[in-house]
Image (spheres, rainbow, N blue to C red):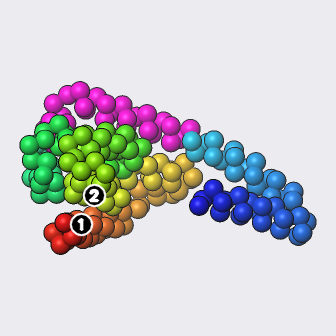
Amino acid sequence: MLNIIWPVFIIISIIYSIITGKVTEVNNAVFESANETVKLTITFFGTICLWNGIINIASKTSMIEKLTEKLSPIIKFLFPDLKKEKEVQKEISMNVVANMLGLGNAATPLGLKAMKSMQKININKESLSNSMAMFIVLNTASLQIIPTTVIAIRNSLGSQNASGIIIPVWISTIIAAITVVIVTKLFIKFWK
């Protein structure tokens, strides 16, 4: 659907710029946007490399095992059918920690790995297991303690208080996480 919507918007904007005589402004905006995109990508790249490196180092130490142990009661509550799957719990814990640090780009490969592991033990390969559904909604809610990526974007765009969004992020992600857990648990209970 998006592969239809975006070209339609682009065609409409080009036609509108020709009709209004603002082709030069549109052309300048395209090149300025491309320049800003490259700058933002370079800023992101540095931040992503830093945190992916930290997550990679942490995964090779006992730190992840300690975090998995600390998160174990929560993981067992959220994913009761994975109580015996220690490796899957570790992968979920790594994903949760990356999301809590606001590292969506680092959390994505960890989340994909956890989903593949859950799919291997999924009885019905044609549909999501309850744990897979819970994992998806938790990732969508993305509980964050330190919204690293958003702070990096705000900082790169010259924000005077790049970290000023932390408390609103806490409030919104905590409410979102609690809501999705309650709703998903209810769906799992009543629509098996």
Which residue lies under the disc numbered 2? 133
The three-letter code of the residue at mark 2 reads: Ala
Q: CA distance from mark 2 to mark 1?
A: 8 Å
Q: How many marks?
A: 2
Which residue is at the front of the view, 55 or 17? 17
Q: Nearer the viewer, residue 88 or 52?
A: 88
- Residue 65: x, y in percent? 15, 36
Measured as percent of width and height from the top left, residue 150 is found at 45, 53
Q: Quadrant of the N terminus?
A: bottom right
Q: Quadrant of the C terminus?
A: bottom left
Above or below 16: residue 111: above
* SS majority, magenta: helix
Above-or-below relation of 17 to 51: below
Labels 2 & 1 near each other (Cβ < 8 A):
yes
**Residue 139 inside the magenta-drawn segment:** no
Q: Position of residue 40 (x, y in %)?
A: 58, 45
Q: Nearer the viewer, residue 156 or 81?
A: 81
Q: Is residue 67 magenta?
A: yes
* Magenta stretch, residue numbers: 42-68
> Residue visible at 51% across and 51% down?
153
Answer with the quarter of the image where residue 93 lies: top left
Residue in the picture at 27% in, 67% down: 180
Mark closer to the chain start, 2 or 1: 2
Secondary structure state at the residue bearing disc 2 = helix
Q: Is residue 43 left or right of residue 63?
A: right
Give the image location of residue 113, x and y in percent. Answer: 31, 39
Q: Residue at x 36, y 31 (%)?
A: 53
Image quarter of residue 13: bottom right
Q: Which mark is residue 184?
A: 1
Q: Residue at x 11, y 54 (%)?
A: 80
- Circle 1 sits in a helix, a strand or a loop, which is it? helix
